[in-house]
Amino acid sequence: MSGDDDMFFATALAWLQRDIDFDGLLWGTRTAGRTDAVLRVHGRPAAMAHEHGRIAASDPVTLRAMAAPDEVHALATGIVCAADAQALAFWHGYDTRQLMILAKPDHADEALGIIGVLRASDEPFPADQRRAMRRTAQAILLAQQLREAKATRMAAPPQPAPGAALTEREMAVAQAYADGRSVKEVARLMGVSVSTVQCHLARVYRKLDVHSKIALRKILGDRRARPRVA
């Protein structure tokens, strides 16, 4: 984990602790397109993260969160897990009698992140803390998704600058048109026919994947937008 990850985790933990009483945290995140998750633990031994990976596939707590992401599940482990289940031995082995868990799905409805807050006591989480969990955990997991998306974009190969594929004449026509001139005015300015300007603009729009003068102006970086002369 990087320093930025540590800072984000500490901030998220502080947000949760502000409104929810708990003594442990299990937080798992998974990058889109991957099946393995990165788990972090607070208030319990670090080994909990590794041990959870062994029982996650059959853990009714995790499966419930995966089956209904974006819902807050407040559960008593002794009730939701069978008495002889490996999952119950895991949760009780790490002093967890009550927990609240929320998952965040990706666009394919697969959970990209899970936050579970843990209690060693048998006292259930009250309604106001369930509402706080919904609000805060959703915001944290959404922020995590946005951070990962930004990191993916930053790691991607640089794209050519907009307009790099345009010819000099296409760029001149595009810039004149984006400045606010009409097609007829661009034709007069450049000494060509209206149909020639229209052909140049059609190629410009196709190359830059834009569909309006506003979009063209934006992608060329010219926001002066001089008034159009009738």
Image (cartoon, rainbow, N blue to C red):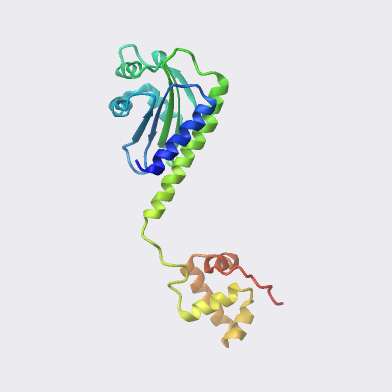
Point out residue 186 in the picture as x, y percentages from the top left corner.
60, 81
Is 122 on the left or on the right of 196, as rendered?
left
Point out residue 25 in the picture as x, y percentages from the top left corner.
41, 27
Q: Can residue 71 be seen in this view?
A: no
Q: Which residue is more in the foreground, 6 or 99?
A: 6
Would you identify the image quadrant in which residue 29 lies?
top left
Q: Which residue is more in the foreground, 7 or 77?
A: 7
Compared to residue 95, the image places residue 177 above or below, namely below
Q: How many labels does the image show?
A: 0
Compared to residue 193, the image places residue 112 above or below, namely above
Q: Is residue 99 visible?
A: yes
| Residue at screen point 44% across, 72% down | 164
Compared to residue 146, the image places residue 24 above or below, namely above
| Residue at screen point 34% across, 23% down | 59
Is 31 on the left or on the right of 186, as rendered?
left
On the rendered image, what quadrant is the C terminus found in?
bottom right
Compared to residue 15, the image places residue 44 above or below, namely above
| Residue at screen point 61% across, 78% down | 183
Would you identify the image quadrant in which residue 28 lies?
top left
On the rendered image, what quadrant is the N terminus found in?
top left
Point out residue 152 in the picture as x, y percentages from the top left corner.
39, 50
Residue occupying the far bottom of the picture: 191
Point out residue 96 in the picture as x, y percentages from the top left corner.
39, 18
Q: Which residue is more in the foreground, 14 or 135?
A: 14
Residue occupying the far right of the picture: 230
Is 188 on the left or on the right of 64, as rendered?
right
